[in-house]
């Protein structure tokens, strides 16, 4: 789930991000990248709030051709909803174990819903049952949700809107030659003068120009 090259990029972003209100992770799965980034925030004494979103809805490999099924690809005994509830519970348990004092404000929602609520400063309930008002500006966003072009593009545009000048975006699966929509999106971003490339390793870390 996590390309090891991202670790260096996350370390760089969290160490060098400008001061702002929050960090956002889009796509949390079982909590690996959440735990890593919260560890890095402690390492660098960063106090920004850690926000996250994930609908925990399994995207089957045959969905686009055969339509969504109730079960996981190739395993008719495993219900899709039960599998994703299990993954979300794994997220809850792993961050509760490793981040007892720094729990992230992660909500079960798509990034589109997250940004809609963020724009309206809505009060939401996170996966730990805490209420939180979504507000402020972002220092850094890790985009690792739906990797299809249209979804990744909306995530980039929404994150860019809320990012402070000098803030970072790490776009997962954006490496040259990747088949993902995120890589196609990266071609567009290279022409966007509001952003500069900081590093590719092999995914791209970009920074909003001040
Ligand atoms: C590659 S996994 C994330 C891995 C995680 N960041 C890690 O490294 O441990 C992608 C996640 O994106 C989530 N996802 C899918 N569509 C999404 C959307 N529209 N908004 C937010 N997350 C989404 C999936 O449920 C899945 O958990």
Image (cartoon, rainbow, N blue to C red):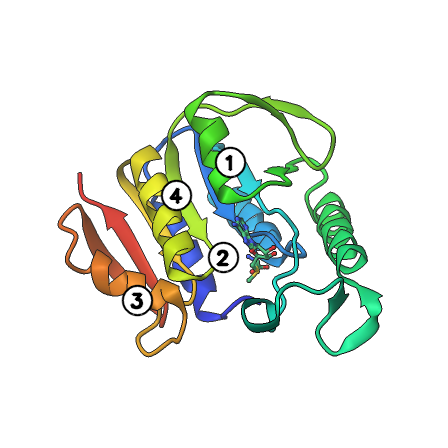
Chain-order first, disc 3 or disc 1 = 1
**Mark-to-mark CA distance, 4 and 2:** 18 Å
Please name which of the two marks, 4 or 3, marks the residue nearer to the observer: 3
**What residue did someone put label 2 on?**
146
Label 2 CB sits under 8 Å from any ligand 1 atom: yes
| Res. 9 in view | yes
**What residue did someone put label 3 on?**
184
Chain-order first, disc 1 or disc 2 = 1
Q: Which mark is residue 114?
A: 1
**Mark-to-mark CA distance, 4 and 3:** 21 Å
Lateral position of residue 59 relative to residue 210, left or right = right
Label 3 Cα crowd, 10 Å radius (few <14 / some 14-19 / many 20+): many
Lateral position of residue 201 relative to residue 65, left or right = left
- Residue 86: x and y in percent read 79, 55
Q: Which mark is residue 203?
A: none
Chain-order first, disc 4 or disc 1 = 1
**What residue did someone put label 4 on?**
140
Label 4 Cα crowd, 10 Å radius (few <14 / some 14-19 / many 20+): many
- Residue 178: x and y in percent read 38, 75
Label 1 CB sits under 8 Å from any ligand 1 atom: yes
């Amino acid at each position: 789930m996590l390309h090891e090259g991202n670790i260096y990029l996350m370390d760089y972003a969290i160490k060098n991000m400008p001061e702002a209100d929050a960090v956002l992770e889009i796509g949390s799965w079982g909590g690996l990248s959440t735990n890593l980034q919260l560890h890095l925030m402690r390492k660098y004494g960063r106090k920004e709030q850690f926000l996250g979103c994930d609908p925990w809805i399994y995207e089957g490999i045959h969905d686009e051709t055969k339509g969504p099924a109730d079960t996981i690809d190739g395993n008719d005994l495993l219900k899709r909803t039960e599998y994703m509830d299990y993954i979300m519970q794994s997220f809850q348990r792993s961050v509760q174990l490793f981040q007892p004092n720094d729990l992230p404000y992660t909500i079960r929602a798509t990034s589109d819903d997250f940004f809609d609520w963020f724009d309206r400063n809505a009060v939401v309930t996170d996966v730990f049952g805490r209420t939180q008002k979504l507000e402020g500006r972002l220092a850094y966003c890790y985009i690792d949700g739906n990797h299809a072009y249209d979804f990744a593009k909306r995530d980039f545009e929404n994150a860019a809107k809320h990012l402070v000048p000098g803030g970072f975006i790490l776009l997962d699966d954006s490496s040259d030659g990747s088949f993902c929509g995120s890589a196609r999106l990266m071609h567009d971003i290279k022409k966007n003068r509001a952003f500069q490339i900081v590093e590719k390793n092999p995914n791209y870390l970009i920074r909003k120009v001040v």
